[in-house]
């Protein structure tokens, strides 16, 4: 309960010709109102459900894990879906986006891909992420055809695509020539007048940062893109790009797209929130657990993301290295099994728990999901209903199982290095 103090001025009485100037300020009566403090955002209402340290395994309801799923055929926003500003820009995106990498894979037909996209739009998703590096140019061509066929308004969805450079291709690097040619080619394939956000996929150490930021500023000034961001950049590279943008009066990046899941947390939880607070760079997350690829949706198999295994440490023999790697794999499988058991108690599967866990963290402004069928996307979206049930006790239990909460290393004194 908050207490609000306010001065109530005396009302002028014209009939009696009362002179209010003679009334001192100290004589004004003070009224105390007792009322509830206003809530800043409806998003925080989710935090009020279950804040005790007790594990809440009650009300175990099915979140769409069975095969017989009824897919919605009419446009209704999925419960739990929220719209947030991307970075500190004014661009509003759904907290769940659709990654097109698995949708336009060779094993998915055009009819099935269209059904997935229509379900996403009907569910309230307004962001589609493309990548020339993953699905090639087919994704942009097919998505452009589906958009034209469906007749969706350009103002109703957000397109993000990546400028990719590869050492295996003749068209490599992030030179001004390559950036402009890549953007123009993407626009032609998508059959769209502009792209909402262009992401520079991986930094190019062979190209000056000034040239990259000036080229992206030119692309935005031409109206080919509204914003630009980065993907898989280190915090040092992001800060360098921001510094160059300020120095040369160029448009600054608004978002970083990076991997984030239960087994990959350090960058997303330690450094990207600092980037957001300092320079306004938001966070768009993707991860093998949330992409739901291949057999990951199978409840019978425990699946460890490839990026979870640490790089091989320097050792004196390859035998010792292999033993350490086997021990690490065994520990990861034990953790994955415990997470799977916890998900079963909560009435969901491991993938749904992973999606809800990622969305529970404040730095994640948009989480990219992938699917190879409408049923798979529907199951993933049911994880949004799990968010209110991830109480403090459940989150602490997950932390106890993972035992990998990132901790910022202590600062090193320069005097100690001398």
Image (cartoon, rainbow, N blue to C red):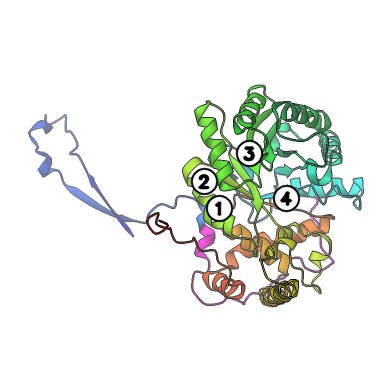
Question: How far apart in space, not on screen, are marks 4 and 1 (Cα)?
Answer: 23 Å
Q: Earlier in the sequence, mark 3 or mark 2?
A: 3
Residue denoted by label 1:
363
Q: Secondary structure at mark 1?
A: loop
On the image, which quarter does residue 296 sit in?
bottom right
Q: Earlier in the sequence, mark 2 or mark 4?
A: 4
Residue denoted by label 2:
276
Q: Secondary structure at mark 2?
A: helix
Residue denoted by label 4:
123
Question: How far apart in space, not on screen, are marks 2 and 1 (Cα)?
Answer: 8 Å
Question: How far apart in space, not on screen, are marks 4 and 3 (Cα)?
Answer: 26 Å
Q: Position of residue 141 (x, y in %)?
A: 85, 36
Q: Position of residue 139 (x, y in %)?
A: 83, 41
Q: Earlier in the sequence, mark 3 or mark 1?
A: 3
Task: Please identify the dominant SS of the magenta region.
Answer: loop
Q: Position of residue 370 (x, y in %)?
A: 77, 53
Q: Earlier in the sequence, mark 4 or mark 1?
A: 4
Q: Secondary structure at mark 3?
A: strand
Using residue 356 as the reference point, say whether residue 8 is left or right of it.
left
Q: Nearer the viewer, residue 254 or 242?
A: 242
For image coordinates 67% across by 75% down, the residue present is 335
């Amino acid at each position: 309960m908050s207490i609000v103090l306010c001065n109530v001025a005396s009302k002028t009485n014209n009939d009696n010709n009362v002179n209010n100037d003679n009334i001192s300020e100290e004589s004004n009566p003070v009224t105390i109102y007792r009322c509830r403090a206003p809530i800043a955002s409806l998003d925080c209402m989710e935090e009020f459900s279950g804040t005790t340290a007790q594990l809440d395994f009650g009300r175990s309801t099915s979140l769409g894990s069975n095969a017989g799923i009824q897919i919605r055929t009419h446009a209704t926003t999925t419960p739990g879906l929220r719209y947030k500003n991307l970075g500190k820009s004014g661009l509003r995106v759904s907290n769940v986006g659709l990654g097109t990498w698995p949708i336009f894979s060779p094993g998915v037909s055009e009819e099935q891909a269209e059904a997935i996209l229509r379900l996403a739009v009907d569910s309230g998703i307004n962001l589609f992420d493309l990548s020339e590096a993953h699905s090639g140019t087919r994704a942009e061509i097919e998505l452009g055809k589906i958009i034209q066929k469906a007749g969706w308004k350009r103002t109703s969805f957000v397109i993000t695509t990546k400028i990719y450079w590869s050492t295996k291709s003749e068209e490599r690097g992030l030179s001004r020539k390559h950036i402009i040619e890549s953007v123009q080619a993407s626009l032609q394939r998508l059959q769209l007048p502009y792209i909402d956000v262009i992401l520079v996929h991986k930094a190019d150490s062979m190209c000056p940062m000034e040239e990259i930021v000036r080229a992206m500023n030119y692309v935005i000034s031409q109206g080919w893109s509204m914003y630009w961001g980065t993907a898989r950049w280190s915090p040092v590279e992001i800060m360098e790009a921001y510094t160059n943008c300020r120095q040369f009066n160029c448009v600054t990046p608004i978002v970083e797209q990076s991997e984030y899941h239960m087994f990959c947390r350090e960058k997303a939880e330690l450094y990207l929130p600092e980037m957001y607070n300092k320079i306004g760079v938001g966070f768009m997350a993707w991860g093998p657990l949330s992409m739901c690829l291949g057999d990951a949706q199978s409840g019978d198999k425990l699946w460890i993301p490839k990026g979870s295994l640490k790089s091989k440490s320097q050792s004196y023999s390859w035998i010792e290295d292999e033993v350490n790697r086997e021990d690490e794999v065994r520990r990861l499988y034990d953790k994955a099994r415990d997470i799977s058991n916890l998900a079963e108690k909560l009435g969901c599967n491991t993938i749904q728990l992973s999606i809800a866990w990622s969305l529970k963290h404040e730095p994640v402004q948009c989480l990219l999901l992938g699917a190879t069928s409408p049923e798979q996307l529907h199951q993933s979206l049911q994880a949004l209903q799990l968010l209110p049930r991830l109480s403090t006790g459940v989150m602490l239990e997950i932390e106890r199982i993972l035992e990998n909460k990132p901790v910022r290393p202590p600062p090193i004194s320069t005097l100690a290095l001398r």
